Image (cartoon, helix red, strand yellow):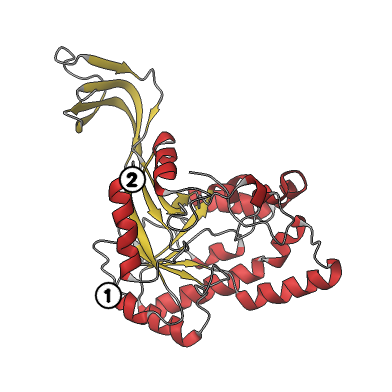
Amino acid sequence: MNNYIIKNARIVNEGKTISGFVVVRNGIIQEVGKGEPETLSDFVTVLDAQNQFLVPGVIDDQVHFREPGLTHKADIFSESKAAVAGGVTSFMEMPNTNPQTTTIEELENKYSIARKDSFANYSFYLGATNDNMDEIRKFDPSKNCGIKVFMGSSTGNMLVDKRETLETLFAEAPGLIATHCEDEEIIQHNTLIYKEKFGDDIAVTCHPRIRSAEACYASSSLAVDLAKKYNTRLHVLHISTERELELFAKGDYLSNKKITAEVCIHHLWFSDEDYTTKGTLIKWNPAVKTARDRDALFKAMMDDRLDVVATDHAPHTIEEKQSRYAESPSGGPMV
């Protein structure tokens, strides 16, 4: 299979769809063309796509592969294998592992694991904290995909909630900043309201009201304001609400956007109506919101206000996910 041709395909590439063929020699794509290839005689293998879609390998810019430290859930070997099986040939992995990827040393450790075990192309985010600016200043954007900033609650000390730290981050970050945007103060206030009402037995249907649209907008609007103030390259992860869409402009992110945004599969598929049947299996942070939010996200994806579709792949054991609401971790296997 090092030399073959795929013909009669609907090829989706670089914003266009054409009917054509792809030539592969010695395992490398040599030609992508319209219509029929001129010759097939020197190919042992000819694959007729029969007008099916042919797309490049997918790049997933947000995954949690759980290694090191959380490998009872998954690891780089197992999850990169799952990625390739689903057509994802490159991934960008998040820093909330154990230990957390908040130093250059821990970042290099992940690359060492991936060089040995990954089936796919890979890059890793360096995680920001309230006190690791010295590590962030060492960050090399030519070798790593970005700096992850949790502007909402997260694992351990990775919540970056000090305004002074955020100002410094956005002013001095040597590469792209990718943010998880939910306002922690609003979330904690909402959590207290529902704990007073329901005690320790809060229903999962309360999740989008605890991690509310207000919490999302307050945080994402702050991130956008800081990025504009310091001319920072900002990528806002997993947008989940209609209101947040006003923060982002239409346009080609490859050429002229300093601020881009992402939507995840689950926010395009589910709505808060699904909590009654799916329960904690669809518990994500940010929460799945209303059908109106879902439909607005889909529209924004189509008109280029949202620039990336990702999975936020975050596996847990089924026993963990089936815990009651407060104990059940957020996330699901999606890659």
Residue with the most extreme top position: 41
| Percent of width and height locating residue 193 | 79, 73
Quarter of the figure with residue 123: bottom left
- Read off the residue under disc 2: 117
Amino acid type indicated by mark 2: Asp
Q: Position of residue 175 (x, y in %)?
A: 31, 69
Seen at 42% across and 34% down, the residue is: 85
Residue 256 in sight: no
- Secondary structure of residue under mark 1: loop
Q: Nearer the viewer, residue 27 or 41?
A: 27
> In the rendered image, which quarter contains the N terminus?
top left
- Residue at horizontal 46 percent and vertical 87 percent from the top: 164
Give the farthest residue toward the bottom. Answer: 164
Residue 109 located left or right of residue 129? left
Counting residues from the N terminus, which is met first, the one under dot 2 or under dot 1? 2
Label 1 crowd bin: few (<14), some (14–19), many (20+), radius 10 Å:
few
Q: Nearer the viewer, residue 131 or 113?
A: 113
- Examine the image and state in which quarter residue 190 appears: bottom right
The residue nearer to you, when weighing 100 against 264, is 100
Picture coordinates of residue 128, whole percent (x, y): 42, 73
Judging by the rendered image, the residue that carries numbered circle 1 is 138
